[in-house]
Image (spheres, grey):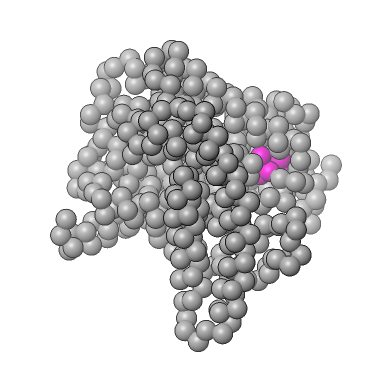
Amino acid sequence: METHEFFLYLLVILLTARVFAELATRLQAPSVIGELFAGVVLGPSLLGWIEPVEAIKLMAEIGIILLLFEVGLETDIKRLVRTGLKSFVVAMAGFVLPLVLGFALSYWVFGLSLLVSLFIGGTLTATSIGITVRVLTDLKRQQAPEGQIVLGAAVLDDVVGVVLLALLYEFSIGGGVSLLNAGKVLIFVGTFFVLAPVAAKLISLIIKRFDTASGIPGLLPTTIVSLVLFFAWLAHVMGAPELLGGFAAGLALSRRFFLPLGVALHNDERFAHRIEDQMRPIVHLFTPIFFVYVGLSLNLREIDWGSPFIWGFSLSLLTAAIVGKLVGAFFIKEPWVARWVIGLAMIPRGEVGLIFAELGRVSGIFNNDIYAGMVIVIALTTLLPPFIMKWYYGRYGDRLPNTDSGGSPKA
């Protein structure tokens, strides 16, 4: 590709993603749906103006890493500790059930291979904490009892999901499922999660010292992006996906992160806020490129829409994706109204599900039909729950406990 062509492609991608994201939010839908649809419109599915070339793929991969950095940055480990057993039960049930249902349908009903079925089940485990937080915030229920359970469960869901992603990544590059490789990855991931946050925290102290002494603007975003890219490289060296490094760096730099040993590494809230504020424009510049790239990689024209497979596959997995998350909420002791809310809030797959699906596609695990089916399932599970939750709160919200101005629940 010529340089001037790439500039034009990038211009069109960024502007189109923004326009469709704005339209999506005006329609009360998540912005990620608009960015995904922008890729479908620009790519071979409709207009065919832009192809998913290598240069765009590289920028999309940077977008994935920064997206997981933002997820880590917004992860509140203390929230998980506060909500405790209920969040753990909701998260684990909402992780295991979709995984088992998705695998069983793919392997025994549709006759797909073991690795493909594992990838499909893994994709269904995702929960988008960003979309969940946004809906609960809009409804002013993020501090309510059910909101705290949901957010704690979503935190754990993210952590376990990233570990599963590392396992599936190893299976994809290793050519199949192997207990030896799985054990190796779990050891590497465990070591990485223990050491990387400590190292990132120490490095952040050095960055903070240089930031106060520097007379040149822009030191903070430059060094933080460098740190994220370094941890992405380190994750790859240790046999895990690069985006695991982004997640670990975000987790360590979060103002909500704590270390059991950590008096010496006590968080500076103002510095953590500055990291978030200065990194947000960079994250929001690159992440839409990833979602547009997902749409560009999807060729809906090549799908045989008259085939019973695509409809049966998509509808079956959509049912498994919804039921698997809903049922998880009924394992805890809460009023029935609250259980339905918690289950609905865990359904959106959003950006996390798309990351799983994209890894399956680039690894050659998913063919075009399966990839299209997964994107359809992710899009519907992302699009529908916010509307259903708003309707549900409008109808049954008076049966749930309120919160006072300080955020603590009251009857």
Q: Which quadrant is home to the C terminus?
A: top right
Residue at 56% from the left image edge and 79% from the top image edge: 210
Q: Is residue 117 left or right of residue 154?
A: left
Residue at 47% from the left image edge and 54% from the top image edge: 234
Residue most extreme to the bottom: 215
Q: Is residue 211 left or right of residue 141?
A: left
Give the percent coordinates (x, y) of residue 134: 58, 49
**Residue sitting nearer the eye, 164 or 76:** 164
Determine whether 29 is above or below 328 in the image.
below
Quarter of image, res 360: top left
Q: Which quadrant is home to the N terminus?
A: bottom left
Give the percent coordinates (x, y) of residue 370: 35, 27
Q: Which residues are magenta?
A: 148-153
Queried whether the magenta region covers residue 149, the answer comes back as yes
Residue most extreme to the top: 109
Residue at 67% from the left image edge and 57% from the top image edge: 257
**Residue sitting nearer the eye, 146 or 388:** 146
Give the percent coordinates (x, y) of residue 255: 65, 62
**Residue sitting nearer the eye, 54 or 10:** 54
Q: In this rendering, does residue 332 appear at all?
A: yes
